[in-house]
Image (spheres, rainbow, N blue to C red):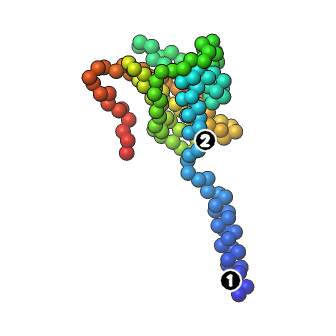
């Protein structure tokens, strides 16, 4: 009887330790950051954008045959200067890759004549909070009568 109780306690203790050691599936807070990015973009909310970007965040935007890089202060300052601006577009997103420390997401803003694809790189900061580290903005013009192909394969 004592051995059975001892085994049951031992199994219970081991189960408790294994549950606390398991970090769980990779989900959660990065989704909130992506949704906040969409909200800040669609409403011109510079305060929200400032909150979800890490201090060294950069926006990379192709202009002709060059890539213009804008820092967090540049982006937040420009948004603040413009003020609240409602975007007339539809937003959607897809997680491209994820790990415990890094997530890559494609956010599409579908306007009437073009689709703006934003590739976000989110990283955990020193406080284990998800923050946007990089944004790559690409504008795809819509050609009448041609359905654009999705460049990302879905499994």
Distance between mark 1 and mark 2 Cα atoms: 43 Å
43 lies left or right of 88 = right
State the residue position of label 1: 4
Q: Nearer the viewer, mark 1 or mark 2?
A: 2
Asked if residue 69 is positioned above or below residue 96 in the image, the reply reads above
- Residue 153: x %, y % from top left: 36, 39
59 lies left or right of 125 = left
* Picture residue at 71% right of the left edge, 81% below the top: 5
Q: Secondary structure at mark 2?
A: helix
- Residue 86: x %, y % from top left: 54, 20
Q: Residues within 10 Å of mark 2 (few under 14, many from 20)?
A: few
**Residue 140, visible in the rendered structure:** yes
* Picture residue at 32% right of the left edge, 27% below the top: 148
- Residue 67: x %, y % from top left: 47, 17
State the residue position of label 2: 29
Q: Quadrant of the C terminus?
A: top left
How many numbered badges does the structure rendering display?
Answer: 2
138 lies left or right of 7 = left
* Picture residue at 54% right of the left edge, 17% below the top: 69
**Residue 59, visible in the rendered structure:** no
């Amino acid at each position: 009887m004592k051995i059975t109780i001892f085994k049951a306690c031992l199994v219970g203790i081991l189960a408790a330790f294994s549950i606390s050691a398991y970090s769980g599936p990779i989900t959660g807070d990065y989704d909130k950051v992506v949704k906040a990015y969409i909200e800040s973009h669609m409403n011109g909310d510079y305060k929200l954008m400032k909150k979800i970007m890490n201090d060294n965040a950069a926006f990379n935007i192709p202009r002709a045959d060059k890539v213009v890089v804008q820092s967090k202060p540049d982006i937040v300052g420009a948004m603040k200067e413009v003020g609240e601006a409602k975007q007339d577009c539809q937003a959607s997103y897809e997680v491209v890759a994820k790990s415990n420390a890094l997530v890559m997401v494609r956010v599409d803003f579908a306007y009437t004549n073009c689709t703006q694809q934003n590739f976000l790189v989110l990283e955990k900061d020193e406080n284990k909070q998800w923050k946007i580290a990089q944004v790559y903005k690409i504008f795809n013009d819509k050609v009448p009568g041609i359905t654009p192909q999705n460049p990302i394969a879905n499994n």
